[in-house]
Image (cartoon, rainbow, N blue to C red):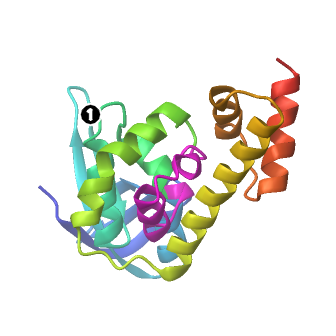
Amino acid sequence: MYAYLSGELAQCDLQSAVVDCGGVGYLCNITANTYREISGKPRVTLYTYLHVKEDALTLYGFADEKEKQFFLLLISISGVGPKGALAILSELQPDTFAAAVLAEDHRQISRANGVGPKLAQRICLELKDKISKLDLKVSPQAAAQAAADKEAMEEAAGVLMALGYSKNDATKALEKCTADNTNDLVRQALRMLSSL
């Protein structure tokens, strides 16, 4: 219904923005990335998605079309609603999200609020083919970071298995870790495994 809104930025915080278009203020839910892009600008353009429910019409706004495209891909997955999609895109830049999906780095996706390891795995599984078919230019830094995260996870799992833990236990513990290098991942996972 609304492709985009262009007008004066009347109000803005980390979760929402009000865009004044011809004297009408449109309230849009936004990501942290969009907030960083539009904050402090007098005039903005937000690419929008109108979510229709029985009891509410909710407008979501994005600073660029790529972020909106990823939002639409995310909400197409069973179990991912608009709030979950916003949380993921607030945690990860669009390029970083695409690189994480392509590298099957579900741990990076599960850092978003309300996204568990199983849902993050399903997101990677369902979106990998769709994202690889898009003509996206993923930044080399995002691709390198996703590859490094995945390699650190694999190395940490190898270390834990060498210490006698099963692959299943090692993987479950590592999915809950927040570190991004092998040594710290092993330390965090060992703390979790020793408390069981």
Magenta-drawn stretch contains 103: yes
Which is more toward the observer, 172 or 141? 172
Residue 89, magenta (yes or no):
no
Q: Give the residue at x 34% y 73%.
A: 64
Residue 162 versus residue 74 in the image, above or below: above
Residue 160 image point, x, y percent: 78, 38
Nearer to me, 6 or 36: 36
Q: Is residue 7 left or right of 193 when viewed as pictured?
A: left
Q: Residues within 10 Å of mark 1 (few under 14, many from 20)?
A: few
Foreground of the two, 192 or 30: 192
Q: Residue furthest left?
A: 1
Predominant secondary structure, magenta span: helix
In this view, which residue lies farthest toward the top? 196
Which quarter of the figure is the N terminus placed in?
bottom left
Q: In this orientation, does residue 177 appear? A: yes
Residue visible at 17% across and 65% down in the picture: 3
Q: Which residues are magenta?
A: 90-112
**Location of residue 157 (image quadrant):** top right
* Residue ID for mark 1: 56
Q: Looking at the picture, how far across and down is residue 97, in whole percent?
A: 46, 61
Label 1 SS = loop
The correct choice, above or below, for 162 with respect to 96 in the image is: above
Task: Find residue 18 and report its horizontal and vertical position in percent.
Answer: 40, 61
User: Residue 154 placed where, x, y %?
Assistant: 64, 50
Q: Amino acid at mark 1?
A: Ala
Q: Quadrant of residue 144?
A: bottom right
